[in-house]
Image (cartoon, coloured by chain):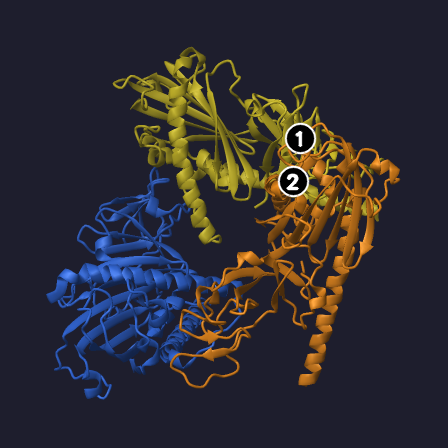
Chain colours: A orange, B yellow, C blue
Amino acid sequence: MKYLKECWYMVGWADDFAPETLVPFTLLGEAVVIFRKSDGSFGALEDRCCHRLAPLSCGRLEGDDVRCMYHGLKFNAQGACIEIPGQERISAKVRVRSYPALERHSAIWLWMGEGEADEQLIPDFVGVNHPDWAMVPGRMDYQAHYRLINDNLLDLSHLTYVHNASDSFAAEDQWALSKMQVQPISRGVRVGRWIEAARLPGTLGQSDEITDRWTTYDFLVPGIFLLYVYVFEAGTAARCNHQEPPANLTPLRQNFTCQAVTPLTEKTSSYFFAIGPNVEHADKKHLFFQMANTAFAEDRQIIEAQQKCIDRSPDVAIMPLAMDQAVTRFNRMFDEMIAAETGRLNLREVEADAVHQ
Amino acid sequence: MKYLKECWYMVGWADDFAPETLVPFTLLGEAVVIFRKSDGSFGALEDRCCHRLAPLSCGRLEGDDVRCMYHGLKFNAQGACIEIPGQERISAKVRVRSYPALERHSAIWLWMGEGEADEQLIPDFVGVNHPDWAMVPGRMDYQAHYRLINDNLLDLSHLTYVHNASDSFAAEDQWALSKMQVQPISRGVRVGRWIEAARLPGTLGQSDEITDRWTTYDFLVPGIFLLYVYVFEAGTAARCNHQEPPANLTPLRQNFTCQAVTPLTEKTSSYFFAIGPNVEHADKKHLFFQMANTAFAEDRQIIEAQQKCIDRSPDVAIMPLAMDQAVTRFNRMFDEMIAAETGRLNLREVEADAVHQ
Amino acid sequence: MKYLKECWYMVGWADDFAPETLVPFTLLGEAVVIFRKSDGSFGALEDRCCHRLAPLSCGRLEGDDVRCMYHGLKFNAQGACIEIPGQERISAKVRVRSYPALERHSAIWLWMGEGEADEQLIPDFVGVNHPDWAMVPGRMDYQAHYRLINDNLLDLSHLTYVHNASDSFAAEDQWALSKMQVQPISRGVRVGRWIEAARLPGTLGQSDEITDRWTTYDFLVPGIFLLYVYVFEAGTAARCNHQEPPANLTPLRQNFTCQAVTPLTEKTSSYFFAIGPNVEHADKKHLFFQMANTAFAEDRQIIEAQQKCIDRSPDVAIMPLAMDQAVTRFNRMFDEMIAAETGRLNLREVEADAVHQ
């Protein structure tokens, strides 16, 4: 399966990158070494010295430069070799690829495309530094293709079956049964759904309180998930005709989770997430995190099992059903973007060949 | 290597299948989920939901139906989908394959063929529920092709070398040296051999007692092994002209073992076995089991080592010797059955194509 | 990548082979079983019985013969089958390949070629039985192609970066910066280099003593490394015009290491080594060994990381630099030897075919 290359991928939370440290990361099957520069900005190089192919992540960060600790070649953050021990002249060919890398929304993003890195395309993420929410960040690694995780997040009907345990999301049947509203948005889809006359899961609400919840999430290219949950008094869903509640209606309670799915290799992925209530209830953020951590381990278990099923018979096709409308709509758009990019890249190669002739 | 598909494979002892439990099993490379129905009979389904390819064995048994616990599809024991959450109409295409499964001779058997399951072909097994024998059942899994295990069982000359230890079968040189009698039987071979003037192995006989033993086993398609050992006073073999002893000659002692080899995948297998004396000596059945368990671990060690040798040079051929007459005869018959089945299946496909045109 | 087959490979130190023991060894991808014969000489057979392909190393050494402990075939040290249980006539075809094996320089050497084993080609090794040096022998196994280890040993500029720690070789920048002298020798290269006005690493010298060191190593086909270090008073290098010191100049101290790289399979290797001072300082040999063991684990770490980099993108080429002149020169010679051997083998096959027609 192909990747979308001309886009930004999340490779970690900013706090995961300690100063003066080389962090190896595999992204879209390519080995990269990421580091914080002295001014706080980020550098990323191909994690393979061009001399004898040792990993630069086994090397040493010297200021903003990276020295290979096999035979001592030193590269600057742009990938140019600036020192070869015992050799005076250095050919311009002695270099490694560098990747655009930057911090935004409390996360670090990498651009893997050949074309110019377009900062307009950084996903409209809401990270742990957002003033409205008190969130705890986390990471899980998967032995699964990243699009299986995307598909999981695009269809929350699975909550009823995967996350019904009381120490997980204690999800109601309504996640599978109630009607969802799907609409296209820029580079993604938006899905809303009412859960009516239900108790709040776990320790998050008073156990005897019955409320209506408006849940709405955006899912954006290449694998960004932003879910808002607004709790209202029972009866609100009906009063809103089961449509999105008006903006001036203040919820009793609210919480939020941001997530990003990142392909490491064709069959391994990283899953970054943060979750918590609005800042007024920051004391509950660890409760939210613990519940989510339990739930996301449930996802990983079923998705890794699904991956093994697929590996055993790679040619068997899935069978899309009515519940999959958000999945299907997003995937169609995503596949078209990948196909268009592949077309552009091929065209670029043809043109480059023409220039060289 | 091909499998014989139109036959029954043992997938476990009946007691291994607890009520209200989904048991995953891989048979001939296909993932299957097996379960006991409420009336005690057995169901077996393809272990992969047709929706998004998650394993049904991660699901939930609801009565005689299986619910996928990813997005909630429910299938009956015939494989038809009978519920899709949030969707009213269900296409007949929403289904998984079901496999004929039944209990016989205290074991569970599965039919993997495309054609009708023929109960006449259930091997004439003698299981732990047979009134004549007091047996303890066991199972070992192998990292080896199932036919290497078949070959091992078809030629007991290996006992002399693999099982000569005193806590194993303490096997005599005669297993390798004495003449065996091989005759074809329905779907298999029968092999008889006298072990003369020998002590019984281990703690099974009085240590100073010298006896003659008539050993005879049937080996049946696809990998069924039934071995009877009859102990007589010394001199009996000679008095019988080294032929099979007459039916009216009562042995001093006797024991029996039934075994079944089942291919999981091309290089992994399950080995089911039970062993023990005649019921009059039921108190010794655990001694028999312990001895056999030690011996069968010896087999597994040499066969898995043999598999690794073969993997290193898959094109090197074996060199059949005189001792291999039972192996060679059975394998020729078995290969012909597989070839004939392959021919039938190809013909069926050609005819099916003709109908569709 | 191809191997050179018509040469001797070290498969262990002589003391590693206990009497009456079958030692399995994988060499150039072929499984071999090695054993000491009753007269102290060595035998080596293909580690796969020709009957049913079980490993002979799971068998039993009976005098100078090897019995397969699956079905009892017995082979002599020349590989001929001399016993088949229960069978009188033995075809000459029942045999396994035998390999020339011998002890020399306190090591065991195997010849894998099809042609006659030429003892003239045994590398001019200096082993632990050499009277001049007091050495401790060791072995490390690598998850890496053996030529990556050869390359490492051929270019000691890596000492500066890989072995600069004080508990390792505490190597100076001069290993990377000072000029080396490379000259071709029979089946290899010789490389000399002065390290000037430096302290001796670790506990090996007095910590405040500044000396000059002449270091010289031979690297020989297929992977033999012999390194001599001679310590002189500071200023000696300049007095020798930075050339090899005259033979009559007695060093203050000296030490030596012999090493051999042996390909097990395409991506696994064994690395045999011994190190120590001249016999007059035999009390320091364990200090040398400990330091080397730490350093060689550093090599293994970077080389195995390099192998993983290569595996990820097998088509990326290395980029030879000025520091690589010994590597490049040796590899060119070695590749030519392999190409010439391949040519000879092909010619031999053509001639053999012509004879058969």
Q: Is residue C186 left or right of residue A276?
A: left
Residue A308: x and y, percent?
A: 61, 45
Local SS, label 2:
helix
Residue at 32%, 24% in the rendered image: B201
Question: Disc 2 or 1, which lies upstream in sequence?
Answer: 1
Q: Is residue B58 left or right of residue A183?
A: left
Asked whether residue C110 appears in the rendered view, the answer is no
Q: Which of the pair A9/B5 is nearer the observer?
A: A9
Asked whether residue C70 appears in the rendered view, the answer is yes
> Could you tell me how far apart the alpha carbons at marks 2 and 1 are, in whole angstroms?
36 Å
Residue under circle 1?
A: B60
Find residue C145 and name its label. Answer: none
Quadrant of residue B334 within the rendered picture: top right
Give the residue type that dot 2 points to: Glu
Residue C8: x and y, percent?
A: 30, 66
Residue C162: x and y, percent?
A: 36, 67
Circles 2 and 1 on the same chain: yes
Mark 1 belongs to which subunit?
B
Q: How many marks?
A: 2
Give the residue type that dot 1 points to: Arg
Residue under circle 2?
A: B341
Quadrant of residue A221 within the rendered picture: bottom right
